[in-house]
Image (cartoon, helix red, strand yellow):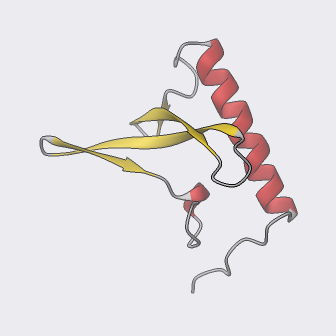
Amino acid sequence: MLSPPPVPGSLGVRALDVVTRLHVAAYRLTEGRIGGRLAGAPVLLLGHVGARSVARRTTPLLLLADGDDLVIVGARGGSRAPPA
């Protein structure tokens, strides 16, 4: 059975946000030696700007190969809710 989508501002969502910020910081400080791979797959840091807030953000995403193609995966920590 699928769990309900995360509630904005909940402890779980806030914890995931903190872990994400730590992941990005570790990746940058070590030039990818820490945080550069997750479950064997390379991690891509995607810089983007919030549509309404115009806040600059960086999100770690998985980069997977599908034959000659590359697939970027964003899953909000495995949540069934959209990662956006």
In the rendered image, the residue lying farthest to the left is 68
In the figure, is residue 31 to the left or right of 56? left
Q: Residue at x 68, y 41 (%)?
A: 20
**Is residue 1 or residue 54 the one in the foreground?**
54
Q: Residue at x 87, y 61 (%)?
A: 11
Residue 68 falls in image quadrant: top left
**Is residue 46 or residue 74 the one in the foreground?**
46
- Where residue 10 appears, x then y in whole percent? 86, 65
- Where residue 84 appears, x then y in whole percent? 58, 60
Viewport quadrant of the N terminus = bottom right
Marks counted in the figure total 0
Q: Eyeballing the image, is 46 above or below 82?
A: above
**Is residue 39 or residue 58 the one in the foreground?**
58
Q: Residue at x 61, y 18 (%)?
A: 28
Residue 22 falls in image quadrant: top right
Q: Eyeballing the image, is 53 above or below 82?
A: above
In the rendered image, the residue lying farthest to the bottom is 1
Q: Eyeballing the image, is 58 above or below 34?
A: below
- Where residue 41 appears, x then y in whole percent? 39, 38
